Image (cartoon, rainbow, N blue to C red):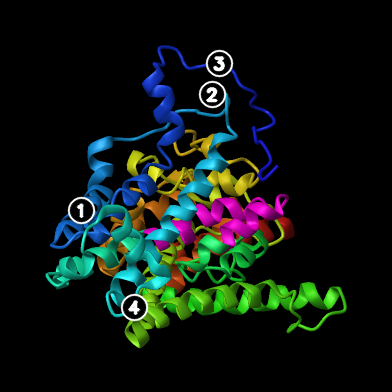
Amino acid sequence: MLFEIFTTPDSPYKGPREGETALMQFWKYFRFASPSFALALAIPLFFVAGNAIFYYAAFLGALAFFGDYFFGEDTEVWAGTYKYPQIFPVLEVAAIFSNALLVILFAWRLGFPATDLFGIGAMVQAVTGVDLVAAFETSTLLSYVGAFGIATAGGALNGVVIGHNTTHRTFEPKSVVIGRIGEAFGLFTYFSIRHPYGHHNLICTPADPSWAHRGENFYKFRMRSVWGQYKMTWNLEKQRLERKGLSAFHWRNQALQGWAIEALVLGMFFYAAGFLGVGLMLLIGFLAHTGLEGANYIEHQGLCRVPTEPFQRRHAWDDAHRMTYWLVWAISRHSHHHSDAQVEEPELNYYGNTNQAMTTPHGYLISGILALIPPVWNKIMIPCWLEWDKNYATPAERKLAAYENINSGLPELVEAGQKYLNEQARQKNEDNAAKVA
């Protein structure tokens, strides 16, 4: 079998939900693949002159960014409601290849008609009879901007979302391979190493470069996080190979394998459109990485964990916004994902309404935009961090959070951190005095 059939062990199928129609059951399975399907609808537009692809990309962008305000929240329990959970891996594979095709078509469009990458233009002309060369003489800059936007969305979905899901199935090597191929179209192959073997073990501690400190602005965090993750990826592979008695530069180095696939993608763009093509593919990777770092920034920022203690649900920010839930394939139920990474994403539970985890004030995309304006983001998050300190942190975590507050440089947090440490020192002195008496 290509994929293991998954069902969360403690949540066997319980039958359809009460009042669930056939259409509702279909949407229950299809909703997570719907963003990739919506992008795939743009495939014919790559071959159409004019600005249609730009307008379609703008529509999808607006729907993604503002959909959280139109579609409300989803806090329901879905575990045990899927009779055919094996459908999800199939949908993921289909999404990976359709998203990758969008990147390939963008490379083709950049080079056509001077270069007909993979003979795509000739095949389309043979099937449709349309003179693509004549049609493309009227192409506008906006059409290329739209094609770039669609390709970037496809590369980001492959790397940040679907590649994340498939490469998490470390028990299923074929799933990991397919996920890494998809990640290559967002220049993301390191993610399959650094994320499951680094991030999940180190999160909410300074040892994880993708953990954001309180008050740390997004721009500084992004630079530190990306460099730290590439470095961690190399070190993890080096250590793995050394345990096998192999050199870090052995062909079995999975980091080098992934970067070789990425080089092929860049080579494809060079063949199609020269250095302009390479530059635009690098820009796709840059924007996709920025999207990932936006998620990393939001999902754990400022939450502290004692390194020797296990991850608990309070160590991640959950999100209930329905559009975000669909876009990121349910990974916005982040506290459950980290507390049990073997649970498949569609069966993750939301714990932001159970006093086990806190929830983000806005969906992922809106939060990502707000994070680009540090004063606005800090104003939103300061009361959230203080609430976590008061109602969620253990005494040991509260002390770590106090130092985080002081080091943040934000006056309100600095005052709270100093006040807490002073109270602890006073209490300690009183206890010592009582013992002496």
Mark number for residue 115?
4
The N terminus lies in quadrant: top right
Indicate the amino acid at tag 1: Tyr
Say which quarter of the image contains residue 10.
Answer: top right
Q: Earlier in the sequence, mark 3 or mark 1?
A: 3
| Residue beneath the point at 39% across and 74% down | 286
Q: Distance between the residues labelled 4 and 2?
A: 49 Å
Q: SS class of the residue under badge 2? A: loop
Q: Where is residue 71 in the image (x, y as percent from the top left)?
A: 27, 36
Among the two numbered marks 1 and 4 on one chain, the one whose residue lies closer to the N terminus:
1
Q: Which residue corresponds to mark 3?
A: 15
- Callout 1 environment at 10 Å: few (<14), some (14 to 19), or many (20+)? many
Instruction: In the rendered structure, find residue 284 and report the number of the disc placed on it.
Output: none
N-terminal of the pair, mark 1 or mark 2, is 1
Residue 49 visible, this orientation: yes
Residue that mark 2 sits on: 81
| Residue furthest bottom as drawn | 275
Cβ atoms at labels 1 and 4 below 8 Å apart: no
Q: Which of 92 and 290 is in front in this view?
A: 92
Query: Which is more foreground, mark 4 or mark 3?
Result: 4
**Side of 412 relative to 349 (left or right):** left
Indicate the position of residue 131 as horizontal and vertical percent values: 21, 64
**Residue at position x 26%, y 68% in the image:** 373
Which of the labelled discs sits on residue 56, or is there none? Answer: 1
Specify start and end residues of the magenta stretch as a single range: 154-180
Which secondary structure lies at badge 4? loop
Q: Separation of disc 1 and disc 4 at Cα? A: 26 Å
**Badge 3 amino acid:** Gly
Q: Nearer the viewer, residue 195 or 190?
A: 190
Count residues near mark 4 (Cα–Cα under 10 Å), then give few for <14, some for 14-19, many for 20+. Answer: some
